[in-house]
Image (tube, grey):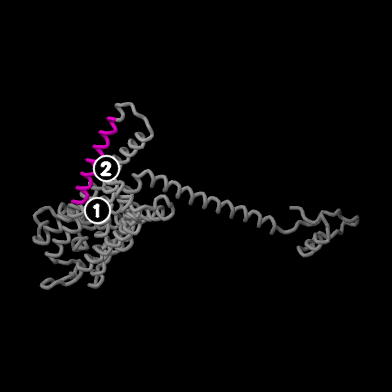
Amino acid sequence: MNNATNTTPPTKDPYYENWNSFLWVFYIVVMIVTILGNSLVCVTIYVDRRLRSPTNWFIASLAVSDLSYALSVLPFRIVSTVLKIQEVWVCQLWIWMDMCCVAASLANLAVISLDRHLKITKPFDYHRKMTKWRSFAAIGGVWLYAATLSTLSIIAWPGQPGVVLSPSGLCSNTNKTFYTVANIVAFLCPLIVLAVCYTMILRTAWIQFSKMQLLASAYTSSNEDKRKQKSVRRDFKATKTLAIVMMTFTVCWMPLFILLTVRQYDPLTLRTISDPKLRMFVFNTTALILPNLNSTLNPFIYAYFNVEYRRAFKKLIVSVWDKQARQYTGSKRRSSLTSFFQSPFARRTTPPSDDGNHNQNHNLKDDAQSLCNGDTMVTQI
């Protein structure tokens, strides 16, 4: 969600050229991995009926937002490393898609953490109230919020220039009030939700863990006790996953939002770093590398750390592999049978005449006619 969508203006500095080449390769790799990872999450949820639950619908929405970012925003970044943007409407489109995808992704993270908090702390109320249509309504609210915020980001507010394009091809929007509020709403609020949900889940899991220890000390082994122990272990796994999400989210986005907020009021903040190479390293790492990694890591954190998703992924991959193998084997067999039946008839094997002038140049039509007449000595393949 950058209000400045390019790096520093291009120069002939070899250090800058090296950074430009690195970013070009980095964007391509991130785009490919993000598309593959999030596409696999979406396809798996669609194919596996056991994954069609409100929690997984939220994860699918997160995957769609990250997939949209890879398909609509990263291509702009790749092109901007080699070409200069020359139209303001291109900047507006880029900023709108960037803001929409990022805001949706961060809001989905907050909704997922809230959903898991309710599922663990109030399981009975959760299963009764969180229906499929209510989860769809929540997802619709997330995308409506993201679209509204992104539209406000490209509007020329009173007294503000709006989206501008510099002669060097740098897209920017210097609306101090809007971006200050947007940073609070889009970053700080989801971070607070994640922190509160993580704390509540950890507290609930610890209480259940203490109860499980008491049950274990009493040597109880009924089915109900085993079910409770399994529930506690599942809660701890959810706590660990949410802790990884919170840490990744903070590391990837906090430096950028701090930098954007400070630069709104002091555009020359980075100039305090005297070394230009270090200044470029700080800017590129904070604004261009870490935020893009978050969309790549999300499917691994939410999906690949989950036992159900790992099972579904393996099943899907094996199914596709077996299908391809069967198609390959079938096509190979059909090719062999086709070549067998399409082979030319061999010449007849009737003994030659006494005078040695037996004609062996029968054509295919004659052989076929002889075969139809019942001659079993026609072909020999």
Between 22 and 357, the one lying in front of the other is 22
Between 360 and 324, the one lying in front of the other is 324
Up/down of 312 relative to 158, above or below: above
Task: Using the rendered image of the protein, determine whether residue 251 is visible from the camera's viewpoint.
Answer: no
Residue 92, given in percent of the width and then of the height, sits at 23, 69
Residue at which label 2 appears: 239
Q: Is residue 221 left or right of residue 184?
A: right
Q: Say if mark 1 contacts mark 2, CB within 8 Å.
A: no
SS type, badge 1: helix
Lower position in the chain sequence, tag 1 or tag 2: 1
Q: What stretch is highlighted in magenta?
A: 192-214
Up/down of 95 relative to 281, above or below: below
Q: In which quarter of the image is the N terminus?
A: bottom left
Q: In this view, does 256 lie to the left or right of 317?
A: left
Residue 217, given in percent of the width and then of the height, sits at 29, 26
The type of residue carrying mark 2 is Thr
Up/down of 140 relative to 324, above or below: below
